[in-house]
Image (spheres, grey):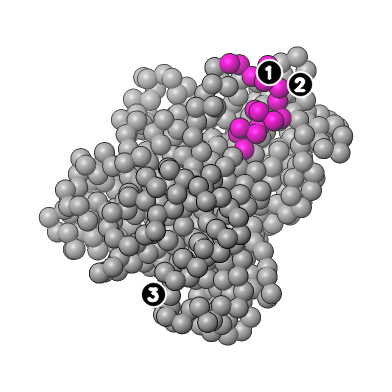
Amino acid sequence: MSDMDVIIIGAGVAGLTCGCLLAQRGLKVLIVEKNQKIGGCCSSFQKEGFSFDLSVQSLGECQEGGRIWNLLRKLGILHHLRFIPLEPAREYHFPDQKIVQSSQLETHIEHLSRVFPDQRKGISQVYEVLRKIFDEFSHVPSSLNWFDPSSLSSQFPFLLRYKDQTFGQLLGEYISHPFLKTILSIRTSYALLPPEEISVVGMAGIEMSYFNHGVSCLEGRVEQFPLAMGEAFKGMNGKMIAGQEVEKILMNKKEAIGIKLTDGQELTGKVIISNIDAQATFSTLLSEDSIPMAYRSKLKGMRPSLSYFILYLGIDGSLEELSISNNEVFPDDQISQEYQALYENRIPGGAPFYLLAPSKVNPSHTPEGKSTLCLSMKAPYHFSGGWAQKTIDELSEFLISRAAVLIPDLRKRILVKAEATPKTIEKWTGNLSGAAYGWAQIPSQSGIHRLQRTTPIPNLFLTGHWTSPGGGIAAVVASGELTAEVIWSKFERGES
């Protein structure tokens, strides 16, 4: 392993995707993972007979023709996994009404059009823009020169037109009804941003990766997905080191030539790919003088996404009170109000929250006659109250009391409890400030403005949610595929 073609730092989904595709082509690939378990955010844990997925509960693009489905087929492991379609995809609970959202775009548009008949044309136009942006972004070649306006305007007109716009601005063009704007904006919360801040490009990825090929849960535990990829990687003669952290990236003059592990072992490679936190890559693994000043300044000015507080519960009995597994509960229809508090490092008293019941679609998560709940809400890393156990207990109590409105006897049915804070997420993933989705998907950090796969350091590349397309499992699979394409082209040209 002293002379690899490719060394990948981090065995998250993007790193595994990239590693598998390059090993499949015959390159000698090594993946190094600091944790004993691979998969990054796509991991699971068990407590007292209950299974919990850490942070990934549902996936887009897993049905036939979707990006994840196509990848698994290409790697020959599609038959190892079974995806359960979720239809409807989710329910949104407001104080005086419930909104049911289909996972099928045409059904979703038709339902909204019946409720808001005078807005039918605008609804269709919003989703047509999102669809075209998503399609264009899905076909952007890795070799495209983003700074050539002529190639952008001719091949990718919607990406060019909307590259600096927010989703709120797009809604302002086509939608006039305030509550319809709220409904269409609900899923901006999956990027941890209000509609006034999330980019149109980022929103296109979030919405269309679900609508194009449905929403699914993986039968069993979500970690089976990266574990299956890890086995496929080893079957292609890929090499894996788990439980070892990279201490630094080795340089020869100004080029990346390998890595040094915390146990002192040095490994060389023709190409180094970082699938870990971008700030850590450039501030911890590299010396400051090896990075151009302009690139250092760009990194310092970039903003990570918010994070989550998550409460995992093992429950006695079934959860017949809930119609479906994926729910989001709002105190009112002002979905942007909580962000001011979050940006002030507070969690507002009336914060919306997610209420997921994974065992409704995955009974194997629990002993017979039991259920699982996952309650979560957006959270700042630098919480004003700190993340002491007292704070954790107070937030847990808040979520339980809110969820008990839908599940009246919840409190006395709790058998198992576990919590995760932004600090926990930072520890799991190494992500700066426990960022759930890498850089926040604001216009200045989305699409062509996100970090490029190539870096100013020769032979050093990036993959994962710190580069395009951004956060989410389907998006990081796309990132892994695009980075693999860049690296393979480099080898084909004889440049490594």
Please state which of residues 271 and 177 is positioned toward the viewer in this rendering. 177
State left or right for residue 319 relative to residue 280.
left
Please say if 402 is above or below 443. below
Q: CA distance from mark 3 to mark 2?
A: 58 Å
Amino acid on which disc 3 is placed: Val
Residue that numbered label 1 is attached to: 290
Residue position for label 3? 405
Given contact means CB atoms under 8 Å apart, are the residues at marks 2 and 1 in contact?
yes
Q: How far is the residue under mark 2 from the one under mark 1?
A: 9 Å
Q: Is residue 274 visible?
A: yes
Q: Which residue is mark 2?
A: 251
Mark in front: 3 vs 2: 3
Q: Which mark is residue 131?
A: none
Q: Secondary structure at mark 3?
A: loop
| Three-letter code for the amino acid on which mark 1 is drawn | Ser
Please give the range of residues in magenta.
277-293
> Can you see residue 491?
no
Q: Does 106 sit left or right of 417 as displayed?
A: left
